[in-house]
Structures are given as structure tokens and as C-alpha cells.
Image (spheres, rainbow, N blue to C red):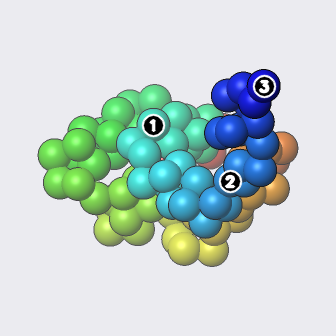
């Protein structure tokens, strides 16, 4: 008898690009910037994202808090899995 595992779960693979987009489009990713920008600044970014629908990266660039290269490094797959940006550099 075939069960749920056999009929539905075996063979499922993640769509890596869709997963990445979902993470980067989530307001929650702002918490990853907390040690870099500080809690108050991250609260402000989150509120702007909620009000405007912009991404965290878009708001950071618009407000010139971080540049594209910094954001690419911070939100790289490698850094998301093994964070290197652990120190404080509040702006």
C-alpha cells in the first residue's frame, strides 16, 4: 500500500530561487541587520517596508544605510547560513 510519503513527499525538491526570493522579500529579514544597524534603525526599516511594500534591501539602499555590495555580502547564502557580520557598526 502506498502512503502519503510515497505519493506526495518522495521526489519533492525545493525551488532554490523561489525560496531565496521569499526570504529576501520578507520583512522579517530585517532582524538579520540588527547587529549591524541597531534595533531602532531596523524598526524604522520594518515599518517603512510594511507601509510601502518595499523590500528591506530597497529601503536600505534608498536611505543610504548600506550599499549594494554590502547588502549582497550580508544577504548572501553563505552569510545567511554562517553569519560573518556579527559586530556592531550602528549608523
Along the horizontal axis of the image, is 1 left or right of 91?
A: right
Percent from the top left, x then y, of residue 34? 54, 35
**Occupied quadrant, residue 60:** bottom left
Q: Residue at x 35, y 33 (%)?
A: 43
Percent from the top left, x then y, of residue 67? 53, 71
Q: Nearer the viewer, residue 27 or 5?
A: 5
When the figure is inspected, residue 31 is found, relative to residue 11, above or below; the finding is above
- The answer to whether one can see residue 74 in this image is no
Q: Distance between the residues labelled 2 and 3?
A: 27 Å
Q: Residues within 10 Å of mark 3 (few under 14, many from 20)?
A: few
Query: Which element carries disc 2, helix, strand or loop?
Result: loop
Q: Name the residue under label 2.
A: 14
The N terminus sits in image quarter = top right
Query: Which element carries disc 3, helix, strand or loop?
Result: loop
Q: Name the residue under label 3.
A: 1
- The answer to whether one can see residue 26 in this image is yes
Q: Nearer the viewer, mark 3 or mark 1?
A: 3
Q: How far apart are marks 1 and 2 (CA)?
A: 21 Å
Q: Nearer the viewer, mark 1 or mark 2?
A: 2
Sequence-wise first label, 3 or 1: 3
Sequence-wise first label, 2 or 3: 3
Sequence-wise first label, 1 or 2: 2
Q: Residues within 10 Å of mark 1 (few under 14, many from 20)?
A: few
Kindly check if marks 3 and 1 are in contact, taking CB atoms under 8 A apart as contact: no
Q: How far apart are marks 3 and 1 (CA)?
A: 42 Å
Q: Nearer the viewer, mark 2 or mark 3?
A: 3
Along the horizontal axis of the image, is 77 left or right of 34?
A: right
Kindly check if marks 1 and 2 are in contact, taking CB atoms under 8 A apart as contact: no
Q: Name the residue under label 1.
A: 28
Amino acid at each position: 500500500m502506498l502512503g502519503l510519503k510515497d505519493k506526495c513527499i518522495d521526489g519533492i525538491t525545493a525551488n532554490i530561487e523561489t525560496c531565496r526570493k521569499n526570504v529576501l522579500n520578507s520583512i522579517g529579514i530585517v532582524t538579520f541587520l540588527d547587529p549591524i544597524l541597531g534595533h531602532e534603525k531596523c524598526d524604522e526599516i520594518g515599518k517603512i517596508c510594511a507601509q510601502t511594500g518595499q523590500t528591506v534591501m530597497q529601503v536600505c539602499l534608498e536611505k543610504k544605510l548600506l550599499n549594494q555590495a554590502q547588502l549582497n555580502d550580508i544577504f548572501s547564502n553563505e552569510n545567511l547560513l554562517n553569519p560573518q557580520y556579527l559586530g556592531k557598526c550602528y549608523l
